[in-house]
Image (cartoon, grey):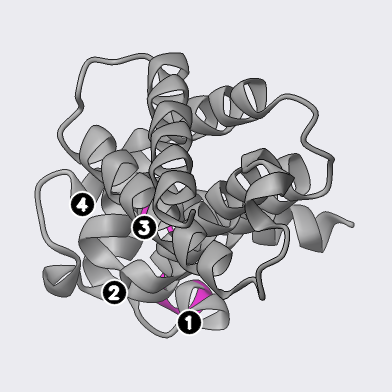
Amino acid sequence: MKSNQRIELTKRLLQEGLLRILDHKSLEKVSVTELCQESGINRATFYRHYSVPRDVLYDMQKMVAEEINRRFFQKEIDDASAYLSAFFTYLYERANWFRLFIRNCTEDDLLKIVSDALTRVSANTIPLALASGKDGTDLRLLISFIVGGGYYVLRQWLMEDIPQPPEKIAKLFLSYLDYSTSIYHKSSK
């Protein structure tokens, strides 16, 4: 038990140290020695858990993905607006982390996390009548279009620190969803 607590403390200290360094330096220029000094951890302890500083950031990203999975993907969506507001609030409260992920990690992992949430909302919100009688290809493409745009709206909102509350961004996404599905519905008649 104590060993697990020690490991968690070590990882948290390294994460906090890395966050402080990345405020003024790019990840590529962070050395293991510098990270260890900033975190108050010796190099041998660092190498027990990681190979390079980038691994600390990947560990942080994995931890956030697991938390998002627990909080948002393991429950039903009863109210799309409330679900999105909660999800966007989660992202907004951790905007500094997400900015770091976007700047320093491959976007594929972050895109997958956000896309999964937006896809769930889109698939649960698009009227079933729209999908009826089709092979599903059009619907999948429509959802991809909406989710891709939604991701880049979120990305811009977080990266530029646009002063809009999460609830407004959720309503904006749902309005884009409604508009896109209505245009699609008109064009498919």
- Characterize the local packing of mark 2: few (<14), some (14-19) or many (20 or more) Cα atoms within 10 angstroms: some
Residue at which label 3 appears: 148
Compute the Cα span from label 4 to label 3.
Answer: 28 Å
Which residue type does callout 3 highlight?
Answer: Gly
Q: Is residue 35 left or right of residue 174?
A: left
Q: Is residue 10 visible?
A: no
Which residue type does callout 4 highlight?
Answer: Leu
Secondary structure, mark 2, is: helix
Residue at which label 1 appears: 47
Q: Any mark on residue 22, and which?
A: 4
Determine the image quadrant of residue 131. bottom right
Q: Residue at x 39, y 34 (%)?
A: 179
Which residue type does callout 2 highlight?
Answer: Val
- Characterize the local packing of mark 3: few (<14), some (14-19) or many (20 or more) Cα atoms within 10 angstroms: some
Secondary structure, mark 1, is: helix
Which is more N-terminal, label 2 or label 1?
Answer: 2
Residue at which label 2 appears: 32
Looking at the figure, which quarter contains the N terminus?
bottom right
Compute the Cα span from label 2 to label 4.
Answer: 13 Å
Which is more N-terminal, label 4 or label 1?
Answer: 4
